Each structure stands twice: as structure tokens, then as C-alpha cells.
Image: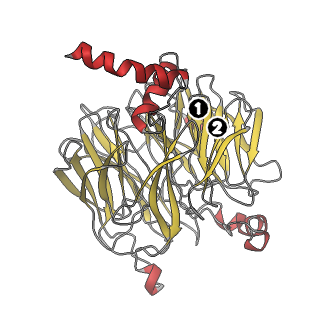
Amino acid sequence: MYRTALLGTLPLALAVVTGDCEGQDCDSPSNIFLQTAHHRQREEKYHWPSGRGRFPFFAVSENNAPFHVNNSLAWSWHHPEGRFHTLTYGTAVDNDLNVYLTCADAMRKFDKDGNLLWEHGCMPANFMNAPVIDQGMVYISDTKGGVRALDMKDGKRIWHTNVSETTGQDNGFNMVHKGVLFAAADWTGDSPQGPANKYVKALNATTGDLLWSYQPDMPIWNFLALFPDESSLVFQDMTGKAYRLSLEGKLMWKAGGLEGTWTDGGAALGPNGLVYTVNNNHPPGYMTKLTWDPPTLPGTLSAYDVKDGALKWQVTTPRPPNNAPAVGKVYGWDGLSVVIPVCQQVFPGATCDVNVYDANTGEPRWVFHGPTQKGLMQAGDLEGLATRKAIFSLESGGSGRAVCLPNGWSAPTITADGTVFVGSEEGPIFALRDADGDGRVLGEQEVSSFDSKGAFSGSSSAAIAPQMMAIASCDSLFVFKA
């Protein structure tokens, strides 16, 4: 039986590998997998190919990076005309330690020593997502509804596909899996947060052809697709509802969420068979009443069985969970933990924390009390307002994006030794460990920091390579080495 089935697939496999798909649907995700399978046998191993790392252990690295970020900065970059002449959003690192940086005005590639190798401009459109690299290509979305693939070697465009009239100015993640590229699109309509992306779009990563569209029950914000296996994806909408789709775009299950709410956060996936989502427990009243939500209103972290969406546990977070979590083994604790930064951004005086829970039970493990927002705006936004307003003005056809308006934290990353790296809205890049296991992270043995002087978007996270860490604030790129 097995041999017969295998022989039956052989002509199709040979057809797609050789480019002869007559009589076959070569753009179906299953056939795209066959097209790329023979390439993947010799695929170069990228250290951090997306804003959330590498399949299957997203947000967790098999490598370590310098804990003492206060004295390990190797190089940094900002726009040559001035720090505030662009906005920077996310990074990827290839097998040669080259760093790919999303900027509002261009995609840029640097070598391991900080030399600019190429840049690919996009103005008057803007890039606002974290990039993804795969099979020798860089993928990124723009605010004019375009998705494009660039050659990793020289930055030249390979293809460009318009999937909608506009794409949101939130900060999500482009992701690729088994030859399928995923992006959010269609920044229209209404939601608890105003206009937002309504659709998940799937494209052939080789050709740019649109494969399918899926509209969740509520719009998506800071879109992040993750992959539990070879044939499906999971993500959440802005209310915290989790979805699992096949790579063909068929709904497998959906669960959770709190109607009428909005979060800047996203989903996380653990090697324990659980998918994690976040939601706020209150509506975004400041959008309709012009009043600020108190920064201490709680949210919810939920864990679902990836097989069927069954709820396994929920915990109430003491502050709004406006970031995507990370799931892995943290320093000094056994088993898996889920790391979730919590904060109500753009709220003077608000305290921002990093909370860690047992990934299987939701029991609290440790907390780090981060900085409070000191000024009217987050670090770098007020200082850069006039410059960015002129560069990205609506009058010149730009996005009008004069501020980063970031999350309270970057997305967190866990290294091989369990150190948590995360950037704060007040500027510090933190390396965190609960070395003594007392549930409180503080002191020089447990906390190291470097002041970037800028905030961090939700699509930014520490990209880890062997003894190296790269992270983008809202205006600069920083690379640390042992």
C-alpha cells in the first residue's frame, strides 16, 4: 500500500521539480512543498530568519549572546542623514551573520561588521513589518498593499504583488513556511481600534502569486503566523481569538478572544503542543472617548491545545499584555516557561513589567519590574517628531507616520542558556535572568542593560546568532558580540 502510494506521487514530484506542471495545480501549497523540498535538502541554515526566529522553536535560539549588553556593543547604525530620518522595525540574520533591517524608507543589509551591503527603497510606501529570509530571498510588505521578494545577495526585486489597496501601519511579521508566504492586508473598515487589516493573505513565495485569502472574525493587528507542523499555521486576531488554518487556508479550529477588545500582542507557540494568545480585558476606550485607559487594567494570557483548540489554562495578567510572548526554558527554572511583557504604552507614569509563567500550568515564576514612562511620549518619539513629519508627510504621498508609537516592549527572545532579551519603551535593552530563583529579577547578576535612547516596536525582537545579538529600536540598529 505504502509503496503504491509513493509511486503514485512520483510523477507529480518529478513534474514540479522539473517545472513541468501541465495538468497539475502547481500553485497549491502541497505542490509548492514538493517544489521546494529538493532545495531544502541543501538549504543554508539561517540563524534568525524571521522576526520570531526559526521553525519550529519560535522566539527561542539554540545560540547564546552576551549577557552584559552594557559593555558588548560591537557596532550600531542609524540613517546617515540623522537618527530620526527613518523608523526601524525588525531584523533577521543569515548564516554568514549578515543582518537584514526593515526601515520605513528601505530594506537594508549589513555585513557582520556593520558595513552597508545594499538598500532597497520603497518610498512613498513604507515598510513596517519585520522581514523574513528564505531560500535566498527577503520578503516584506509595504503600506500601499504590496508584498515583495528581494534577492538576498543584491537587494534587487524578484517579484512584487499587490494584495490590497493598503496595508496597516501596525508592526507585524512576514513569515514563510513550506514555500508559502503569509502577510496581513486590507487596512479598511471598523474594529475596536479603528481601521485594521481584515485579511490573512497567502502567496506562492517563489512567484508571488496569490494562493488564498482568509478573513477572521475580527481584524488582525501586528499579524504573526506561527507553524506547529508541516501543514498548518496558527495566529490570533486583535481580540485574542486563536485560529488554526491548514496551509490551503481551511479553518481547522478557532477559540477564545474577548469581543470588543484590542491588543497590540500576538500569539506564541510552545514545543509542548500549546498555542498561547493574549487579550486585554477592557475595550480601547481612548479611541472613542478621547480618554486614556488606566495602565493597570488587567489582561488575559490563554493556553490552547494546538490539536483542537481546547482551553488548557488562563491567567489574568496584572497589566495589559500588549506583546507576543515567548515560550522556552528560562535561566534557573526547570521545564518550559512563557515570557510575556505587559504594559499600557503611551501613558505617562505607567509601569511596564516582564512576567514569566509555567508554560504548562500558568503558575507565576518570576517578574521584572521595568521602567515607567517618564515623558509625554515614548523614548525618541518627541525628539524625532518634526523630522519624521517632514519626511513622511501625507502631502508628499507618504504615510504620515511621524512617530513610532510603539509597544511598551519589543517582543521577547530566549537564548540557549535561558536569558531573556527585551527592549523597553524607555530605551534600555535588557538581558534578564532569575539567577537565584526567588521570583524577582533585580541586581547586576540578574539584570544587564544598554540605553538605546529609543523605544521598540512590537515587530522588533532580539535576533540571535552565535555569540551575537542584533536588535532594532525605533530609529537605530544595535549589534552586540561576545
Left or right: 123 as drawn, with respect to 459: right
Residues under numbered marks 1 and 2 in contact, where contact means CB atoms less than 8 Å apart: yes
Which residue is label 2 attached to?
100
Residue 44 picture quarter: top right
Q: Secondary structure at mark 2?
A: strand
Which residue is label 1 attached to?
93
Q: Is residue 119 visible?
A: yes
Residue 414 location in percent, x, y? 41, 36
Q: Is residue 72 visible?
A: no
Of the two numbered discs 1 and 2 on the same chain, state the one appearing first in sequence: 1
Quadrant containing the N terminus is: top left
Circle 1 Cα neighbour tier, 10 Å, few/some/many (<14 / 14–19 / ≥20): many
Query: Three-letter amino acid code at disc 1?
Result: Val
Q: Which residue is at 56% across, 49% downward?
A: 428
Query: Three-letter amino acid code at disc 2?
Result: Tyr
**Which residue extends farthest bottom?**
289
